[in-house]
Image (cartoon, helix red, strand yellow):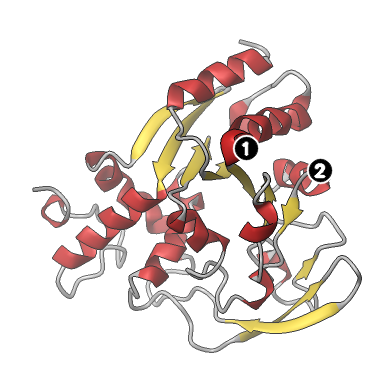
Amino acid sequence: MNQYTKNDIIQQLDALHTPKGVPVLFHSSLRAIGTVEGGAEALLDILVEYFTRDGGLFCVPTHTWHNLDNEITLDVTSDDNCLGAFSTVAIRDPRGIRSENPCHSMVVFGDKAQAFVKDEISVPTPTAPSSCYGKLFDMGGYVLLAGVAHNKNTFLHTVDEMLDIPNRMGNKPVPMAVRKKDGQVIKTKLCLFDTDYTEDISYRFTKYETAFRYHRCITDGFLGNAPTQLCSARKMKETIELIYRNCGDADPLADEEAIPQKWYCF
């Protein structure tokens, strides 16, 4: 198919059977999705309309960790982000509210968006359980991965903190600053992700997918051309918790080897 229409996309979303009235965090690759009639703006319209009906929230990550060496790590007055075209389109859309997370902001759409992003400027870590990422779990939300894998699943950093997994977070707060819409600059500090095993632990989050599938955390489908996973935040957390309950003193992400089945499969 050369071009997907609104009806095509809605049929694909219906096939995923997303529960109504919950937040959905969307990580995506526009290139993998392919051509949608009306472009990225039209795709955003479809997704916002679909996921915000019945009180739901649609969340688009707009991270700015590429600014960690800069004085201002998040400028809410600009569309600056390090996640690409779809995130830029979301930032520019007047219906959305951008959170003030100093390096892991998101744009949130829906009637309850303002409450969802409240107090993000004061989070202690990028994906703290008190942040929007933790609220995704609290509200029974989902992560929608369209054309990307679990190495892009930012919520899994939140699970690390919820379970207090060792060797995941640094203990030295890093200075950051947020420029608010009114131009005011607020300085803050965050502890960042840090591990001895690898430069970026999220690349090993893909090791969890087999366990996620065993415990039915994932519903598979498509969005455009892109293989798409709808992932329950609560089930993913429960599965990772099970793995760490059974792994003894080992760390499942310490190397590139597959996670042993005996740690999650009974």
Three-letter amino acid code at disc 1?
A: Thr
Q: Is mark 2 on a helix, strand or loop?
A: loop
Report the residue at 75% width, 84% height from top.
187
Image mark for residue 142: none
Image x and y of residue 25, in percent: 55, 47
Vertical arrangement, residue 60 with respect to residue 137, above or below: above
Report the residue at 74% width, 42% height from top.
85
Image x and y of residue 236, in percent: 34, 51
Image x and y of residue 181, in percent: 87, 65
Image mark for residue 52: 1
Residue that mark 2 sits on: 93
Q: Is residue 139 left or right of residue 132?
A: left
Vertical arrangement, residue 45 with respect to residue 256, above or below: above
Vertical arrangement, residue 202 with respect to residue 101, above or below: above
* Mark found first going from the N terminus, 2 or 1: 1
Q: Nearer the viewer, residue 240 or 194?
A: 240
